[in-house]
Amino acid sequence: MERLVGTVARGVRAPIIREDDDICQIVTDSVINASLSEGFSLHKRDVIAVTEAVVARSQGNYATTDDIANDIYNKFGDKTIGVIFPILSRNRFAICLKGISKRAKKIVLMLSYPSDEVGNHLVSLDDLDKAKVNPWSDVLTEEKYRELFGYKEHYFTGVDYVKYYRDLITASGCELEIIFANDPRNILKYTKNVLCCDIHTRERTKRLLKENGAELVYGLDDIMTKSINGSGYNEKYGLLGTNKATEDKVKLFPRNCFEIAKKIQKMIFEKTNTEVEVMVYGDGAFKDPVGKIWELADPVVSPGYTDGLIGQPNEVKLKYLADNDFAQLKGEELKAAISDYIRKKDSNLKGQMVSQGTTPRRLTDLIGSLCDLTSGSGDKGTPIVLIQGYFDNYTNE
């Protein structure tokens, strides 16, 4: 019978993973046991993905707010710190901010507006239009912000993040000034010592500050890059990719993810004689049309993956072929013509009209986003995702 199913993504349940658990063994066993339980087989180029959260947990990759405070003090001492462009998040940034403020004497918190880097809005564009505010040039004090916009709660969380961050910082006994601006150079009017908290724009932000007279410039990726008093760390991403663990502890982004992916790949092959691809994934990269959040608060979608996941899809657009090259055909004749075209397609379709409308993104970003949506972030209990048929096309039987 003709094959009628394409890509399938399955959430795979796993035990609750704790520090020092063998994550590679758990992933391998969970996938194989799921295949036996549900009656499916593994195939070449299936993708096994495991969320970064359980990888980091198995590594015990945690840091306390005191650890963060100590590293911040080591870098800035008693200087006034400009903390600029943080995202608005109780889970992602608030606990980091608690640590940052613990030993600081004064912080100038500069928030981007109308939204943070990943799309969490403080105010709407309509609010800015009504107030005749230009976010690219206007610098607002906290007093002016309140005068213009009052108290605004986040669409989904119901939190006024300006008040939330103010209360969090001042609770540590730290002096605080809040401003709103989108040009990083504006912070230099208040202090020459800056902690850049943006994620995907951090290199440009650092460059602009250094070129314009900043004395000390660090990013979140420069904090907790080494162990502080036995803490966890991430040598590449520092505090980027952290999540709240407790009220005084964060889980850092996992380490050695490429090695973990390759080890799982090897273990699956040894047990099933099947060559699969493996990746560690975090946040997906997609935008919510209502809340406007872009979602990707991690520094990358995937911090580690096997070689078969390098690159972009190389696909033709079926509807383009049907409407153009083979517009005169229908039924089995159309199917045969398109199938033959796919079999003979170029190995690199970049720039060709036949590929227009296909998603121009990296495989790891596409697959990681699919995994994030499949596993969810709540109580599904499926930190492992098995994707089958992703690399198949219309010609595969």
Image (cartoon, helix red, strand yellow):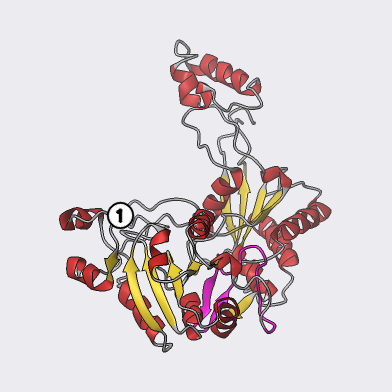
Nearest the viewer among 262 and 64 is 64
Q: Write the residue at 58% across / 17% down.
A: 336
Residue 38 within the magenta-colored segment of the rendering: no
Residue 3 x, y percent position in the rendering: 60, 33
* Residue at far front of view: 213
Describe residue 172's horizontal placement relative to residue 230 as left or right: left
Q: Which residue is nearer to you in this view: 58 or 207?
A: 207
Front residue (pair 64, 212) = 212
| SS at badge 1 | loop
Q: Amino acid at mark 1?
A: Ser
Q: Residues in magenta?
A: 229-251
Say above or below: 307 vs 229. Answer: above
- Residue at 57% in and 30% down: 315
List the single residue furthest toward the right.
270
Residue under numbered circle 1 = 137
Against 306, residue 228 (above or below) is below
Q: Position of residue 389 (x, y in %)?
A: 62, 41
| Residue 240 lies within the magenta run | yes
State the image quarter where residue 258 is shown.
bottom right
Task: Determine whether, in the image, residue 273 is placed left or right of residue 112.
Answer: right
Q: Quadrant of the C terminus?
A: top right
- Quadrant for the N terminus, please: top right
Number of numbered discs: 1
